[in-house]
Image: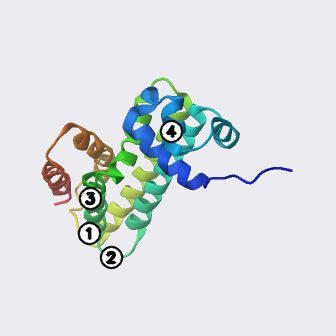
């Protein structure tokens, strides 16, 4: 008779995002995972497979959750400029929170794996394309609503906004002054004027 799991896999996945965000993929040892997750080695293997499998599960979960929120906000009715501003300011609020930002740093670790891991590279490529498309559609709507100038290159602007979201985690890691995130976002958003 199979035993019930003595842990909640969704909680373990969230904790693993924090651990990988803190140590990076390469720097995370199996012992870091076991200690941080509070589960036995066999339970980890039985539920998630290898360290890499757990990492991919954690990255996929994190990125899909964040991207779904962005896409939903961009697709909502109302002001596109307000929606885009909310996306960026919600992002920096997370990065200013000492607990939540540890999860965000998993993105840096995942991006560092792109040159060596075709599966992660393909996942990010697909995610970037769907977000570029969501930003593009929102910007078309913004032009139709008269929120931004018709002559703006909205393909380039969509790409710029999308990649700028990713750069926020770099700034949060490099700077000890959280107010620099506010300045950076205000410059990004000025591209909508």
Q: Are marks 3 and 1 in contact (CB under 8 Å)?
A: no
The residue that disc 4 covers is 35
Picture quarter with the C terminus: bottom left
- Residue at x 47%, y 40% (from the top left corner): 124
- Residue at x 70%, y 40% (from the top left corner): 46
Which one is earlier in the sequence, the residue at label 4 or at label 1? 4
Image spot of residue 23 (x, y percent)? 39, 33
Which disc is residue 139 wearing? none
Q: Is residue 2 left or right of residue 14?
A: right
* Pair 3/2: label in front: 3
Q: Give the residue furthest to the top.
A: 116
Q: CA distance from mark 3 to mark 1?
A: 16 Å
Q: CA distance from mark 2 to mark 4?
A: 46 Å
Is label 4 in a helix, a strand or a loop? helix
Q: Is residue 89 visible?
A: yes
* Pair 2/4: label in front: 4
Image spot of residue 131 (x, y percent)? 42, 52
- Colour theme: rainbow
The residue that disc 1 covers is 82
Q: CA distance from mark 3 to mark 2?
A: 22 Å
Q: Residues within 10 Å of mark 3 (few under 14, many from 20)?
A: some
Against 96, is 74 above or below? Answer: below
Q: CA distance from mark 4 to mark 1?
A: 42 Å
Q: Are marks 3 and 4 in contact (CB under 8 Å)?
A: no
The residue that disc 3 covers is 93
């Amino acid at each position: 008779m199979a035993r019930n799991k003595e842990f909640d896999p969704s909680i373990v996945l969230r904790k693993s995002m924090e651990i990988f965000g803190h140590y990076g993929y390469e720097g995370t040892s199996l012992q870091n995972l076991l200690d941080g997750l509070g589960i036995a080695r066999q339970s980890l293997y039985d539920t998630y497979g290898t360290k890499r499998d757990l990492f991919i599960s954690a990255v996929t979960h994190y990125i899909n959750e964040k991207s779904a929120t962005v896409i939903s906000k961009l697709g909502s009715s109302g002001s596109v400029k307000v929606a885009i501003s909310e996306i960026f300011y919600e992002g920096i609020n997370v990065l200013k929170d000492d607990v939540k930002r540890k999860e965000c740093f998993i993105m840096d670790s995942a991006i560092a794996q792109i040159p060596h891991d075709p599966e992660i590279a393909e996942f990010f490529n697909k995610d970037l394309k769907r977000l570029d498309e969501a930003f593009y559609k929102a910007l078309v709507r913004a032009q139709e609503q008269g929120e931004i100038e018709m002559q703006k290159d909205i393909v380039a602007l969509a790409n710029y906004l999308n990649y700028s979201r990713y750069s926020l985690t770099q700034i949060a890691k490099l700077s000890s002054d959280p107010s620099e995130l506010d300045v950076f976002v205000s410059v990004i958003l000025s591209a909508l004027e």
